[in-house]
Amino acid sequence: AMLIGDKKGAIGLGTGKAADTSLAIQKALKAAQKHMVKISITKNGSIAHNVSAKYSSSMVMIMPNKNRGLVAGSAIRDILVLAGVKHATSKVLSGSKNKLNMAKAVLKALEAISTPHRPGAAPVVQ
C-alpha cells in the first residue's frame, strides 16, 4: 500500500502486488496517482465541516477544530499530514484497527469535500 500527497490538498492511496518489491511499489504508486483527489482546505489549514464514512468494518469521523493542531492517530494522521491539513480532530468509531481499511474510510470521508485531482503536481511519497 502506498499513500501520496502534495501537502496542498491532493491525496491518493494505491495498492500493488508483484513478486518483486520494486514492481509492487511502482504499481502502488501508479494506482495512488490514478485515484488522487483534491480536498478543499480552509485558510487556517482545516477542513470545512464534519465528515464521516464507513469502509468495511472501519468507521471514522473527521472534524474541524480551531487552532488546536492535528488531533489524530495512526493512519488518519498520516493521511491528513500528506493532504496538508493542519487543524483537525479525528475519531475511529469501530472495533477494527486495520490500517488499510481505516485509510480507505478516511479517503471515502474526504471525498465529500473533494474534487478529482489534475495530474502534474509532484506528490510527496511516504
Image (cartoon, rainbow, N blue to C red):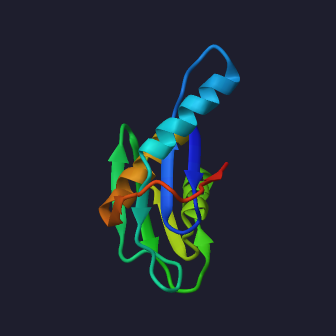
Q: Residue 32's x, y, as percent? A: 50, 42
Residue 95 visible to an observer of this rendering: no
Placement of 106 over or under 35, stated as above or below: below
Closer to us: 62 or 39: 39
Q: Is residue 71 left or right of residue 108?
A: right
Closer to us: 121 or 99: 121
Q: Is residue 98 left or right of residue 35?
A: right
Image quadrant where residue 76 sits: bottom right
- Toward the front, the furthest residue is 120
- Toward the left, the furthest residue is 112
How many numbered dots are placed on residues in this image?
A: 0
Q: Residue at x 39, y 60 (%)?
A: 110
Q: Residue 105's x, y, as percent? A: 41, 48
Placement of 3 over or under 72, stated as above or below: above
The image quadrant where one finds the N terminus is top right
Q: Residue at x 41, y 65 (%)?
A: 39
Image quadrant where residue 111 sits: bottom left
Placement of 55 over or under 47, stated as above or below: above
